[in-house]
């Protein structure tokens, strides 16, 4: 289950990707090893992001 900080970070990231950059989002899942949210996006699926449990974006 994502933390509140992760959900806030995910909302900001998805908004930025879809409304500002006009890029599709393909996958959003939790990495069971690290508990980070993983996001795969972009027209050619070349944008990868991770959101840590405290909401930091990598």
Image (cartoon, rainbow, N blue to C red):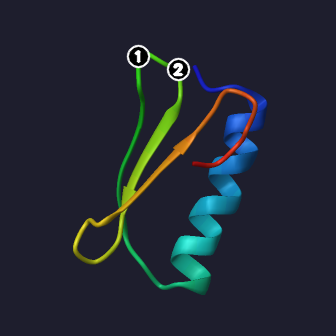
Q: Which residue is mark 1?
A: 32
Residue drawn at point x = 57 percent, y = 48 percent:
58
Q: Residue at x 41, y 16 (%)?
A: 32
Give residue 23's position: percent from left, percent from top. 42, 78
Marks 1 and 2, how far apart at CA: 5 Å
Tag 1: Cα neighbours inside 10 Å, few (<14), some, or many (≥20)? few
- Helix, strand, or loop for circle 1? loop
| The quadrant where residue 2 appears | top right
- Mark 2 sits on what residue? 35
Q: Residue furthest top?
A: 33
- Relative height, residue 20 to residue 46 (above, below): below
Left or right position of 13 against 24: right
**Residue placed most toward the observer, 18 or 58:** 58
Where is the N terminus found, in terms of image quarters? top right
Q: Is residue 25 above or below residue 37?
A: below
Residue 14's quadrant in the figure?
bottom right
The secondary structure type at the circle numbered 2 is: loop
Give the x, y percent position of residue 37.
51, 35
Whether pointer 1 and pointer 2 mark residues with C-beta atoms closer than 8 Å, the reply is yes
Q: At 75% across and 46% down in the image, what residue appears?
A: 8
37 left or right of 16? left
Q: Is residue 44 left or right of residue 23?
A: left
Is 27 above or below relative to 23? above
In this view, the residue farthest toward the left is 44
| Image spot of residue 15 (x, y percent) | 63, 69
Q: Is residue 29 left or right of residue 55?
A: left
Residue 45, x across and y down, in percent? 26, 65
């Amino acid at each position: 289950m994502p933390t509140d900080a992760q959900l806030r970070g995910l909302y900001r990231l998805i908004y930025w990707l879809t409304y500002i950059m006009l890029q599709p989002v393909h996958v959003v899942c939790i990495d069971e090893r690290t508990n980070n949210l993983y996001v795969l996006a972009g027209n050619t699926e070349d944008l990868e992001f991770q959101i840590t449990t405290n909401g930091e974006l990598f």
